[in-house]
Image (tube, rainbow, N blue to C red):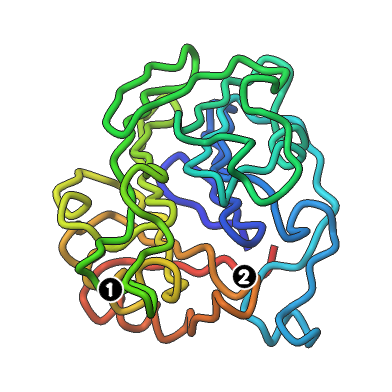
Amino acid sequence: MTVRHDDLRVTWYGYATARLEATDGTVAYVDPGRYGVLTGEWTPPGGGNPREAAHPRATDHRPTDADLVLVTHGHHYDPDGIERVAADDATVVAFEGIDAGDVDRDVKPVDELPFDVVRIGEADHVAVDGVGDVWSLPAYNDPDGPHTQDDGSVLHPRGTGVGYRFTLGSAGTSVFWPGDSDALDAFAELDVSLFLANVSGTVCMSAPEAADLAERMDPDLVVPIHYNTQSFLEADSAAFAADVAGRSVPVALDESS
C-alpha cells in the first residue's frame, strides 16, 4: 500500500528504504538497499510468511528514477542499492563521515559513485536544483540515554551519521528521516509535515520513544519504517500506530508493497 500525503506518494520497501514521489514527478529515496529489500532476496526473520512479519514483500527493484538519494550513515550505505534507484542525473547526498574503509562490507567509496555526490556535515543546508532543500541534523545514541550497550558504549556515537529534513515537490512538502538515532530533543523542534519514524528499538529509538517524539513534533502524518527486516529490528507496528493515533497524530502503515 503506497501512502498518499499532500502531494507525495510514499512507499516503504523494507529496512531503511523509502521512496517519495511528488505530483510534479520529483522522486527521492532515503537510505536505499541492504538486506535484499531491493533485490528480492529478503525473507522475514525466522523464514516465515512475509504477511506475518508486518513488512513489505521483497521485490527485484531497479527503477533508476531517483532525482535525489539521501544516505544517513555507513550502516545504511549500499552502493548497489543507490545505483538501482538513482537516475543518471541524480544527486546523492551522503554524510561526510561515511568511509568505505570503515564499513564492514566490501563497498565502493562514496566519491566513486557515478552521480553528482554532495558530502554533507552534521548541521548543513544544501539546495538541490530541481528537487528541494536538504538540511542535516546530528543523529546518534546518547551515551547517557536508553540505548547503551552492556559495556557502556553506543552503536551510533555522535559523528556517525545524520538525519535529514528535506522538502520535495512544487508544494515543498517537508519530510524528516532521523536515520539511526535516539529520539533527540532537537528533533521535536522541527517543523515537519511527514515524519518517517524509525521504530526498531534495539539500535535506535523504540516505538514508544518514537511515539513520544511524534506527539512533541506534531507532524501532519507519521509513517514508520526500518522495522522487522531483521530479527534485531522487531517491532509491533500495529501497537505503534495505535499509540500515535491515541495521541491525536495521524499515522499510516505501509506493509504491503
Instruction: Provide the residue designation for mark 2.
Output: 255
- The quarter of the picture where the N terminus appears is bottom right
Name above or below for residue 145 compared with residue 191. Answer: below
Are there few (<14), some (14-19), or many (20+) residues within 10 Å of tag 1?
A: some
Instruction: Provide the residue designation for mark 1.
Output: 209
Are the residues tagged 1 and 2 within 8 Å (C-beta)? no
At 73% from the left and 60% from the top, the residue drawn is 35
Q: Secondary structure at mark 1?
A: helix
CA gap, disc 1 and disc 2: 21 Å
Q: Position of residue 29 (x, y in %)?
A: 58, 40
Q: Position of residue 61 (x, y in %)?
A: 80, 47
Q: Position of residue 73 (x, y in %)?
A: 49, 44
Which amino acid is tagged 1? Glu
At 20% from the left and 43% from the top, the residue drawn is 191
Q: Position of residue 212 (x, y in %)?
A: 22, 72
Q: Which quadrant of the figure has residue 6?
A: top left
Q: Secondary structure at mark 2?
A: loop
Q: Nearer the viewer, mark 1 or mark 2?
A: 1
- The quarter of the picture where the C terminus appears is bottom right
At 85% from the left and 63% from the top, the residue drawn is 41
Which amino acid is tagged 2? Glu
